[in-house]
Image (tube, grey):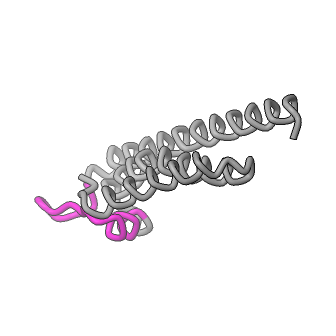
Amino acid sequence: MNEPETEQTVAAAEIAISNLLRVGVLLSAAVILAGLLLLLATGRSGYAAGFYPTAPVAILRGAAAGKPYAVILSGLLLLILTPALRVAVSILLFLRQKDYLYAGITAAVLAVLAISFALGKIV
């Protein structure tokens, strides 16, 4: 691959990643706003007093059921996952560029992120 093609590929990858982050942030903001509006409209969180979901599956089930607090948490979950998705896309882009060193490093970063998500709590 010659130099101009490589520069064009890198520029296209940076634009793709930028668009991915932009869409992720806007989508999460829209979901959070929808949850806030739902909370204001109903005046209830959708859960009994003192109980709030913390597991991602419970949050998504609550959001699917239209519970305002779960919708807000789903937006926050999207916001948290957006940078992780950016790392995953970077792996694909590095592999496409046949840059195996950075693909390996990025895969290690994604593994650390996945382990931290698995060991930590959302809220």
x 50%, y 47%: residue: 82
Left or right, 65 with respect to 97, comes to left
Locate residue 61, reporting x and y percent: 38, 70
Question: Residue 32 appears at what percent x and percent y?
Answer: 42, 44
Where is residue 77 drawn, in percent x and y? 39, 52
- Magenta residues span 45-63
Residue drawn at the location 40% of the way across and 44% of the way down: 37
Q: Give the number of callouts.
A: 0
Q: Is residue 96 above or below residue 36?
A: below
Q: Quadrant of residue 11?
A: top right
Residue 62 shown left or right of residue 119 in the figure = right
Q: Specify the farthest residue to the left.
A: 50
Q: Is residue 96 above or below residue 119?
A: above
* Viewer-side residue, 13 vs 81: 13
Quadrant in the picture for residue 14: top right
Among the 4 quarters of the image, the one containing residue 17: top right
Q: Residue 78 in the image: x percent, y percent?
A: 45, 51
